[in-house]
């Protein structure tokens, strides 16, 4: 059986924070504000995985009120989510995703992000798409105050 899941996340940009996207530290004067490392791409992928098998959302398993997740590397949460998916009898076929930000330019980092995700999820890099988009200087993202991500995952029963 095939199932799909959709995920979305957004975080505000702040000074004195690292910008982590797909597990890659991106040089930039601002970083994402959040309880964890605030990796919006990984958070959107986690929500898409959980949604694909109707397990709820990221906050149900990794709440921002739990100090165990304070400043945690989101790749750890992604690996735990993939284990939950496998325990439900499913595996990931492919992921398609968007990172939406006005700055910085992400093209130089996309390949490394895909490599990281392939390693964390244990699927071929060729099965992971990461696209960088802008919001054409519209809304909080386009004005450089936030970064968002969207992800769709296709899973199949094993």
Image (tube, rainbow, N blue to C red):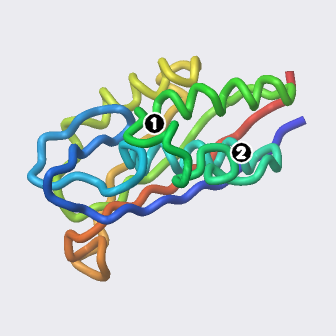
Q: Is residue 3 left or right of residue 19?
A: right
Residue placed furthest toward the front: 67
Q: Residue furthest left?
A: 29
Label 2 to label 1, Cα distance in Å?
A: 15 Å
Nearest to the observer: residue 132 or residue 67? 67
In the displayed structure, does residue 54 sit left or right of residue 103? right
* Vertical comparison of 51 with 9: above or below: above
Going by the image, does 16 lie left or right of 74?
A: left
Q: Residues within 10 Å of mark 2 (few under 14, many from 20)?
A: many
Task: Label 2, secondary structure: give it.
Answer: helix
State the SS at label 1. helix
124 left or right of 82?
left
Q: What residue is drawn where x is 66% and y is 28%?
A: 82
Query: Residue 120, relative to residue 9: is it above or below?
Result: above
Name the spot of residue 54 as percent of width and height, x first. 82, 50
Query: Which residue is denoted by mark 2 in the rendering?
Result: 50
Towards the viewer: 75 or 111: 75
The circle on residue 74 is 1
Quadrant of the image occupied by residue 112: top left
Q: Which is closer to the viewer, label 2 or label 1?
A: 1
At a point 48% along the width and 18% down the height, the residue shown is: 119
Q: Is residue 59 above or below residue 87?
A: below
Q: Nearer the viewer, residue 118 or 31?
A: 31
Q: Position of residue 91 (x, y in %)?
A: 74, 26
Q: Residue furthest right?
A: 1
Q: Quadrant of the N terminus?
A: top right
Q: Residue furthest bottom?
A: 139
First in sequence: mark 2 or mark 1? 2
Quadrant housing the C terminus: top right
């Amino acid at each position: 059986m095939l199932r799909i899941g959709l995920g979305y996340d957004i975080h505000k940009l702040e000074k004195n924070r690292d910008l982590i996207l797909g597990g890659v530290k991106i040089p930039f004067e601002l970083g994402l504000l959040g309880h964890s490392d605030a990796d919006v791409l990984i958070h959107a992928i986690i929500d898409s995985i959980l949604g694909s098998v109707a397990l709820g959302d990221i906050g149900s398993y990794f709440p921002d009120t739990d100090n165990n997740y304070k400043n945690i590397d989101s790749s750890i949460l992604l690996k735990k989510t993939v284990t939950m998916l496998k325990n439900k009898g499913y595996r990931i076929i492919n992921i398609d995703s968007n990172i939406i930000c006005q700055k910085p330019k992400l093209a130089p980092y996309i390949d490394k992000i895909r490599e990281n995700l392939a390693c964390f999820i244990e699927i071929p890099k060729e099965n992971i798409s990461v696209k960088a988009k802008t919001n054409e200087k519209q809304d909080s993202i386009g004005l450089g105050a936030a970064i968002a991500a969207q992800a769709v995952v296709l899973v199949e029963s094993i």
